[in-house]
Amino acid sequence: MPCVAAETRGSTYLKSIAPADLFPGADRFGPADARAPAFPVYKGDTLLGYAYLTTDLVDTTGYSGRPIDVMVGLTPDGVIAGAKLMAHHEPIVLVGIPVARVEAFIAGYIGRNVFDPALSNASAPPVDIVSGATVTVMVIGDSLLRSGRKLAGALALAGSDHAGPAQAARTIDMSRQQVEDWETLLGDGSVRRLLLTVADVNAAFDRTGRAEAMDRPEPGPEDDTFIDLYAALATIPTIGRSLLGDAEYQALLSRLKPGQQALLLAGRGRYSFKGSGYVRGGIFDRVELVQNEAGVRFRDKNHKRLGSLAAAGAPDLPEIGLFIVPETMTFDPAQPWRLQLLVQRATAALDKSFVTFDLSYLPPETYLQAAAPAPAQGTSPAGPLPPAAQTEPPAEIPLWQRIWENRAVDITLTLGVITLVTAIFFFQDMLVRRPVLYGRVRTGVLLFTLLFLGWYAHAQLSVVNVLTFVDAMRHEFRWDYFMMDPLLFLLWFAVAASLLFWGRGAFCGWLCPFGALQELSNKAARRLKLPQVKVPFALHERLWPIKYIIFLVIFGLSLHSLAMAEMAAEVEPFKTAIILHFVRDWWFVLFAGVLLLAGLFIERFFCRYLCPLGAALAIPGRMRMFNWLRRYRECGNPCHRCAVDCPVQAIHPDGRINPNECIQCLHCQVLYHHTQLCPVVVGRLKKAERRAAALTSNPSLPPAVKAATAIEPPAIETPAAATAAKPADA
């Protein structure tokens, strides 16, 4: 059912457009069709097709948060005969992108059939994407197709009978796990919006024709917001992770039964979509979920209140709730559905008048994939099945397994780097004796960690993952939803193993993308001769406990509310710098930039003093099995070379290595074997040389004894090569 408040928008634009703009040769518009918000277009007495406004049929919200209005002419067989951009508020188009380029994009759909299978993939429009306005034009293209199909179905046009089976053979692609910001979610249709003003609501009640309702208009300015309502299917991984955050999303999955879905509804304005009826009767009577004309209302037991949205740039909405679809409703997440909002108006002491508004929703094509065809019962490719086999339904492949199959290449590369780091630790003595090779290997691993694991695969662990795991242990632990993201699962498995063997350093020093970004940027700063600040050790050991305090605060909040804990976890700049590539609100970017700027002068500044994830991993890391970092008796007394050169000052002045602060970079082990940079090694070599010289100068010794006392040079790179790549810069 179309939104009654929007039915007149198309008729308004008819006054400023000619019939020939949509259908060549057309000379007049007919009266509005009773079945849908569309207007027949004629040439003489010949019906050419129908004119309609995309916004009247589907949500067309772009980056601006306001609809993009396009008038479309659709032929009776589903072909777009014409399309014209009528109004928009897109900032990227208002400033910088010529409107002509957007109009040329729209013109690329003219002559296309909305049921053409080639157009079903939203990532492959029939014309080139306008660079710099990707989301805007994708919203337009998507709205052209969806509105055309919806109108064809409402008017029973030719071809509309093919839309149903095509949609029925779709399913949600659960392998898409990326995190998006609010504007992207709103722009691509992941979040749908219904905005009603006071004027919209008053006009809707006026159309009821009930005098008692018309005589009690909503007070206030006509352009005041009556309700600004948002809806999204929260069980789609990208949407759920973006809006809820990883912790809340995993908690939601743990509550759902197989195949069960959940919606996220949020709103603001003078009208509450929740109302107060659920407090008395337990039913949210102002909203109804409708699909295929089957509807259901939510109960309080299926509702969870949220304090805020996790998506970057999301508005501050006073009403946010998660609603689990009851098992009594057969709900297909890949099919269109609508949320029906009931608006009531008191007309007497005990009487009320009602109007309804629809918020339509269809998951964006990018989240859909073709469903595997189900074989007919009792048959197989080779013929009928035996009776025994007919009684056992085929086993369904677990969802997490399908996701792993889709990401086989990413998994292989991740396992490769984990294996390499493991080999580095097991054979570290062979590597650290070769400073040049060590420097190249370490830089290569850090580059792979940053570019692939971080910026490409978004496999950045967070303290939120720790909180999610603890919350699952407190309630109902299930392996399947921890395995939904294969790269994060593999990294956590590697972290768990390394904590038992060596402590937290294997991850923090080698496999953390943000840690890699800090170290590589500091390496560049050193090459540019930027001064490095040496924090006095007395001050340093009073600063590093800050990260443990931050972790304990976040952990305490998680016991009360995971949503609040995830908000506090924004002290981690991982989402800004790694997941969202710095495309975020300016204050988040500024915070991440300040931390990276500090890291140019104090290596790994964030890791040392603020990282709650590092603190969380350091606590169990005390139980490590191995301590393979070698030390001399002279370390700390009198030699302080390693303590001075340690990149994170994890070595105390007395020579002890603090395992809680050590990132296992192996820099001290390079120094341990270095024949030029380690004072202990240099001193021992000089003593050995003096003893050898004294022996060889003794004429009474036979030549065989002198040869036996000759000094064997250590197995290390030549002094020239070692000096060319000082470990301090490795």
Image: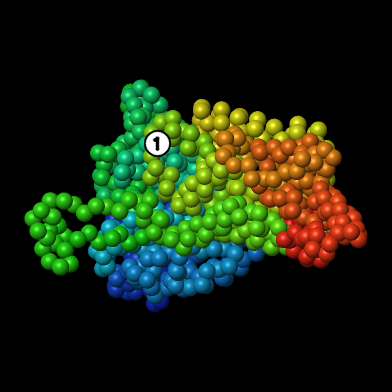
Q: Position of residue 652 (x, y in %)?
A: 76, 37
Q: 313 or 701, which lies in front?
A: 701
Looking at the image, residue 179 lies above or below residue 660: below
Residue displayed at 71% across by 39% down:
657
Q: Is residue 554 left or right of residue 203?
A: right
- Residue at 12%, 54% (x, y): give it: 390
Of residues 684 and 118, which is closer to you in this image?
684
| Rendering coords of residue 107 (x, y %) | 47, 72
Pointer 1: what residue? 477
Q: Is residue 590 left or right of residue 251?
A: right
Q: Amino acid at mark 1?
A: Phe
Which percent across, then down, holds residue 389?
A: 13, 55
**Residue depicted at x 57% and y 70%:** 100
In the rendered image, the vertical position of residue 63 relative to residue 351, given as above or below: below
Quarter of the view holding residue 262: top left
In which quadrant of the rendered image does the C terminus lie? bottom right
Does residue 289 sit above or below 69 in this rendering?
A: above
Residue 633 located left or right of residue 452: right
The answer to whether residue 310 is visible is no
Front residue of 692/235: it is 692
Q: Residues within 10 Å of mark 1 (few under 14, many from 20)?
A: some
The residue at the point 36 percent across, 56 percent down is 402
User: Residue 266, how many percent across, how many down?
Assistant: 47, 39
The answer to which image quadrant residue 693 occupies is bottom right
In the rendered picture of this protein, how many numbered marks are placed on residues? 1
Q: Secondary structure at mark 1?
A: loop
